[in-house]
């Protein structure tokens, strides 16, 4: 089976459509949270995401936009976007987002895989270093954890002799590319497919991943998208302009 992994779309319809157009054939889709927030197409992205399948875990922006999370810990831009999103979402979409499950979520028929937004220990925790990942890697029995939240494509691994982080290395900054990772049976992994709608690793291209469960191969992908259209939507919505300009820098 081929699992398409999407995370942190953040209401960026142009980036989502580009990822779907660039994705190789897949059997089902797993969404790791933050469907909305920051971007200016929340209803369109919820519609598109729901049409793709039923495997979701909730993100912190999904909670914030539906009143399940206070905005005290959000920076002013993120808080403003959450309030705007809440006002824009249809009642049906608000209820759907509010009902998304909390991770970790086991992947049905694949007991070696689980899905989270932040960390298996805390759905809102940021796993950005091997220090953050080490305890989950050592203590969680599930060999492969797919997570999002950080907007950083890559991940972490641990086996009997070592533990470290990894990032896919690409050759260009403007073309569609993929990098493959062969998973090893004796190793535990935490893997982030990257952010569809707001990458923060210095690469502006939309990020996603495809996992071949039989071959145990993970394919990281980056693809360009209509950046200007996504930015223009943000400007037209009178959201903070930084939410548009940062997309071009991948920050």
Image: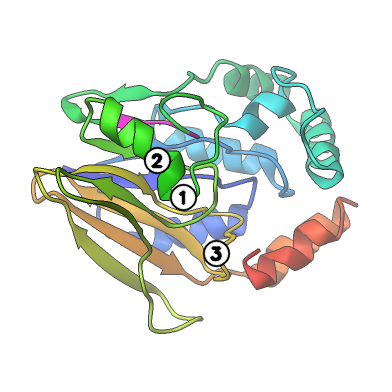
What residue is rendered at 87% in x and 53% in y? 240
- Circle on res. 129: 1
Instruction: State the residue in front, 198 or 4.
Output: 198
Q: Which residue is mark 2?
A: 133
At which x and y percent is residue 183?
A: 16, 51
Segment colored magenta: 114-118
Taking 199 as reference, is 108 left or right?
left
Secondary element under disc 1, as helix, strand or loop, is loop
Q: Residue 119, image x and y in percent?
A: 45, 32
Q: What number is the disc on residue 250?
A: none
Q: In the rendered view, tell whether residue 39 sits above or below residue 173.
A: above
Compute the Cα span from label 1 to label 3.
14 Å
Q: In front: 31, or 134?
A: 134
Q: For the point 74% across and 49% down, which residue is it?
A: 40
Question: Does label 3 or label 2 sit earlier along the sequence?
Answer: 2
Query: Badge 2: how crowded within 10 Å, few (<14), some, or many (20+)?
Result: many
Label whose residue precedes the other's in the sequence (1 or 3): 1
């Amino acid at each position: 089976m081929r699992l398409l992994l999407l995370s942190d779309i953040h209401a960026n319809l142009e980036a989502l459509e580009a990822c779907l157009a660039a994705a190789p054939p897949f059997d089902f889709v797993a969404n790791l949270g933050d469907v909305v927030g920051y971007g200016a197409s929340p209803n369109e992205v919820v519609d598109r995401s729901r049409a793709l399948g039923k495997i979701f875990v909730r993100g912190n922006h999904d909670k914030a936009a539906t009143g399940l999370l206070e905005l005290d810990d959000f920076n002013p831009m993120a808080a403003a976007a959450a309030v705007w999103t809440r006002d824009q979402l249809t009642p049906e979409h608000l209820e759907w987002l509010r009902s998304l499950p909390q991770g970790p979520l086991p992947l049905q028929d694949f007991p070696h895989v689980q899905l989270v937004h932040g960390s298996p220990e805390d759905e809102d925790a940021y796993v950005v270093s091997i220090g953050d990942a080490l305890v989950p890697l050592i203590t969680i029995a599930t060999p492969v954890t797919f997570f999002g939240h950080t907007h950083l494509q890559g991940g972490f691994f641990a086996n009997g002799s070592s533990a470290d982080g990894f990032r896919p290395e690409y050759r260009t900054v403007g073309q569609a590319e993929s990098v493959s990772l062969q998973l090893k049976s004796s190793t535990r992994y935490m893997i982030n497919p990257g952010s569809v709608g707001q990458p923060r690793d210095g690469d502006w291209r939309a990020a996603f991943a495809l996992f071949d469960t039989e071959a145990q191969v993970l394919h990281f992908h980056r693809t360009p998208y209509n950046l200007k259209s996504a930015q223009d939507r943000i400007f037209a919505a009178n959201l903070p302009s930084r939410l548009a300009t940062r997309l071009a820098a991948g920050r």
